Amino acid sequence: GAVVSQHPSWVICKSGTSVKIECRSLDFQATTMFWYRQFPKQSLMLMATSNEGSKATYEQGVEKDKFLINHASLTLSTLTVTSAHPEDSSFYICSASYPQTLQETQYFGPGTRLLVL
Amino acid sequence: AQSVTQPDIHITVSEGASLELRCNYSYGATPYLFWYVQSPGQGLQLLLKYFSGDTLVQGIKGFEAEFKRSQSSFNLRKPSVHWSDAAEYFCAVDDYKLSFGAGTTVTVRA
């Protein structure tokens, strides 16, 4: 149980285009989903937190107009990188909170590697 | 604010040898602690977690971790590593959001 999928796993796009990444919790309903960004050889940086049916909460320094997050249902969140530029190239990972009695646990998707040319 | 320190950037261990990865946290209240593993080009897989209770936590793949409040540590151990354990390991503390350590790269030599 607690499986999270992401699609696509790889995407290459031209500078100026927009890219949408999907994150799905396959076997549970997630109260909250998170989006992270990871640069090579570095740790994960939280970009934003999204709850179903409400606006995402962005971390300081993350451009909300650049990284649009939609949490349409309890099993689906999407991240759209708008007008992508080469500096947006990165590894994007989502996670979903699996509610438990004491504390929620985040389960991570396999990641999406974005390359902007 | 909470923080997590993983003092070892890179550890090399022989296959069959024991492994210990260090993690220190800074957090005022009772911490919720996690260890995740990331294989190259992959997402993170939860190895184990500590919320409360027994301070020795068993996880998947033969890993265990011990919570020591007096030392603010949550070190990860495995008695005998396998070549497939080569990966990046992240310690994290949860205070309404996860804060990750910088990670420790584990290389396993034959």
Image: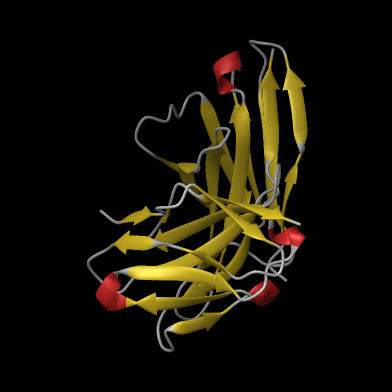
The answer to whether residue B96 is visible is: yes
Q: Quadrant of residue B2?
A: bottom left
Instruction: Residue at 43%, 26% (x, y): give it.
Output: A63
What is the x, y in percent for residue A29? 64, 65
Asked whether A92 or A101 is in front, the reply is: A92
Q: Height in image: A81 above or below B20?
A: above
The answer to whether residue A55 is visible is: no
Asked whether B93 or A58 is in front, the reply is: B93
Q: Quadrant of residue B69?
A: bottom left
Instruction: Residue at 69%, 60% (x, y): give it.
Output: B85
A117 lies left or right of A102:
right
Query: How many numbered tags mark residues here?
Result: 0
Image quadrant occupied by the C terminus of chain A: top right
Asked whether B45 or A40 is in front, the reply is: A40
B43 lies left or right of B35:
right
What is the x, y in percent for residue A13? 73, 18
What is the x, y in percent for residue A6? 72, 46
Instruction: Residue at 62%, 59% (x, y): give it.
Output: B13
Image quadrant occupied by the N terminus of chain A: bottom right
Task: State the scheme by which the image is colored.
Answer: secondary structure
Q: Quadrant of residue B86?
A: bottom right
Instruction: Residue at 45%, 52% (x, y): give it.
Output: B8
Q: Which residue extends farthest left?
A: B28
